[in-house]
Image (cartoon, grey):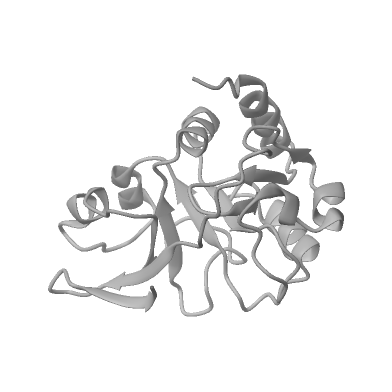
Amino acid sequence: MVDFENDIKNCISALQKGGTILYPTDTVWGLGCDAMNPAAVEKVFALKNRPKEKSMIVLLADARDVIQFVAAPHPDIIAIIENFDRPTTVIFDDALGFPDNVVNRDGSIAIRVTTDPFCKALIKRFRGAVVSTSANISGAPTPSIFRMIDSNIEATADYVVKFRQDDEAIATPSRIVRILENGEMNIIRG
């Protein structure tokens, strides 16, 4: 097993101080912060030069964690999420507890429960939700591997994860869906 213990410690330190992290996710390289820290979220918007009306994804470690952040999820949401066969971000109505700059104007929140060992370990040890947005300047290509990341993003993140920097496997962004009342998925981005 690859050792990413130092990266986890350094990420947690940066997150606790309201900093930003550049890290590999279960999809592409991400730029993240403590999802409950509005000032840290503002830093991510500024680093990406991202319009404020474009909300960001929040990563959680376990499907059951969704229940504490969403007012009325589908009754079978835990089973639905646990049965996804690929990284899937779910748009939920009625977000709970997040700062205004994390929640979409319509009150919805985009949440992905990660299966990636690094991200799972980071989120569990941090004991909180982490913002995950692609590590690119808004409008630029999404960096599926580390060497594709803009040097300005790399230079301005408070901590850059070493783990998987040499990974050349091309990843794609997550599927984005809404779960309908009948439990079926409405695919927004396939």
- Exactly how many numbered labels are in the figure? 0
Work out whether 74 lies above or below 24: below
Residue situated furthest front in the rendering: 168
The quarter holding residue 132 reads bottom right
* Residue 56 visible in rendering: yes
Residue visible at 85% across and 50% down? 156
Answer with left or right where residue 107 lies relative to residue 83: right
Answer with left or right where residue 39 lies relative to residue 94: right
The residue closer to the viewer here, 131 or 38, is: 131
The quarter holding residue 53 reads bottom right
Answer with left or right where residue 57 lies relative to residue 91: right
**Image quarter of the C terminus:** bottom left
Residue 136 location (% of width, % of height)? 72, 63
The residue closer to the viewer here, 169 or 185, is: 169
Residue visible at 40% across and 66% down? 175
Residue visible at 43% across and 58% down? 111
Answer with left or right where residue 64 lies relative to residue 132: left
Residue situated furthest left in the rendering: 182
* Residue 92 visible in rendering: no
Residue 179 location (% of width, % of height)? 26, 70
Residue visible at 20% across and 63% down? 74
Work out whether 110 lies above or below 131: below
The quarter holding residue 23 reads top right
Residue 55 location (% of width, % of height)? 57, 70
Residue 33 location (% of width, % of height)? 65, 48
Work out whether 33 lies above or below 54: above
